[in-house]
Amino acid sequence: MLNIAINTFKEITRNKFLYLIIFFALIFIAFSISLWKLTIWDDDKVIVDFWLAMIEIFWFLSVLFVWSQLLFKEIEWKTIFLILSKPIKRYEFIIGKFLGFSFCILLIILLQALLFLLVLFIKDIEITKIILFSLFFTALKLEILLSFVFFFSTFMSNILTIIVSVLVYLIAHSFSLLLDLVSMTKNSIIIGSIKLLQLLFPPLEALNIKDVIWSFTDFKFFFFVFNTFYSIAYLAIIIIFTILIFNKKKFEN
């Protein structure tokens, strides 16, 4: 399992699309520096909002377009037969792949976060616990997205995996809006159905605290603890279902 994780990490670091995303991220950083000097809005708000959004968006694209190709290429290029012919169990293959990609995500997010915090320090912007938790929750959101891409890629094509993963990501961020809309109908059955449906989706909206950093800061510590454990449990369930499907999958040589 460890060897699979290490090989996956090496494979990802050789992916040209990943370097393309990092290249554009550097361009946006340079653009943001000039934007801060020109903006008529609150300089602190622009810096924090831009960096947090940039970290999530660029790694959102990386998870979608880099990982969704990995398993697909393993199957298409028949290399998966060589891997599974070794004394490696299928669950070790899935977990090893997941850990390899997760380490890559967390490592570069950590580097981006340190650079972000350095910018805040230079600009004399207070580094609040909300900003730190927002970075942590962003990493959790990306890990959950990664687990979904794993799950869908076991039985869907590359393109369909990307489309469905994006839909899950968008819907999971929209339940507050949906509940506000259906509450106008005052129909308890519809409202209850939306709340039940919300349980099937990952808690991405609860993890999206970067959008309320400047308007609401009175978060209880229990909120962070609960959502952290809830997210990890949800992620583990998706990985378990991924392993169950992958165990039954037949590969034609």
Image (tube, rainbow, N blue to C red):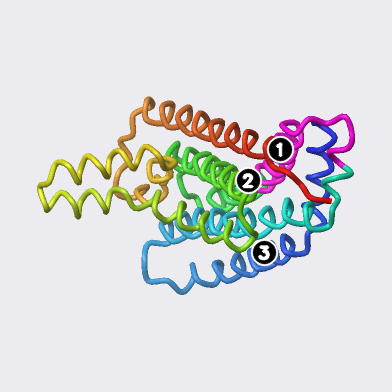
- Secondary structure at badge 3 equals helix
Q: Earlier in the sequence, mark 3 or mark 2?
A: 3
Residue 77's spot in the image, x, y percent? 83, 57
Circle 2 SS class: helix
Of the 4 image quadrants, the one containing the N terminus is top right
Which disc is residue 75 wearing? none
Q: Main secondary structure of the magenta part?
A: helix
Query: In terms of depth relative to the viewer, which is nearer, 232 or 245?
Result: 245
Q: Which contiguous range is marked in magenta? A: 83-108
Q: Are marks 3 and 2 in contact (CB under 8 Å)?
A: no
Neighbour class for label 3 at 10 Å: few (<14), some, many (≥20)?
some
Residue 54 lies, in percent from the top left, at 54, 59
Location of mark 1 (residue): 94
Name the amino acid, label 1: Ile
Count how many numbered circles sit on residues in the image: 3
Residue 21: which disc?
3
Q: Which label sits on residue 150?
A: 2
Amino acid type shown at disc 3: Ile
Where is residue 167? Give x, y as percent: 46, 57
Q: Is residue 137 magenta?
A: no
Mark 1 or mark 3: name the one nearer the start of the chain.
3
Residue 43: x and y, percent? 43, 61
- Compared with 164, 2 (above or below) is above
Q: Image quarter for residue 76? A: bottom right
Please rate how many residues cluster around mark 2, counting C-alpha atoms within 10 Å: few if below 14, some from 14 to 19, many from 20: many
Image position of 133 (left or right of 248): left
Residue type pointed to by label 2: Phe
Task: For the residues labelled 2 and 1, say whether their Cβ atoms are less than 8 Å apart.
Answer: yes
Residue 75 lies, with reference to residue 106, above or below; the image says below
Q: Residue, x 50% and y 28% (percent of image)? A: 233
User: Which residue is at 82% across, 46% downward?
Assistant: 80
* Residue at the limit of the structure toward the bottom, as seen here: 38
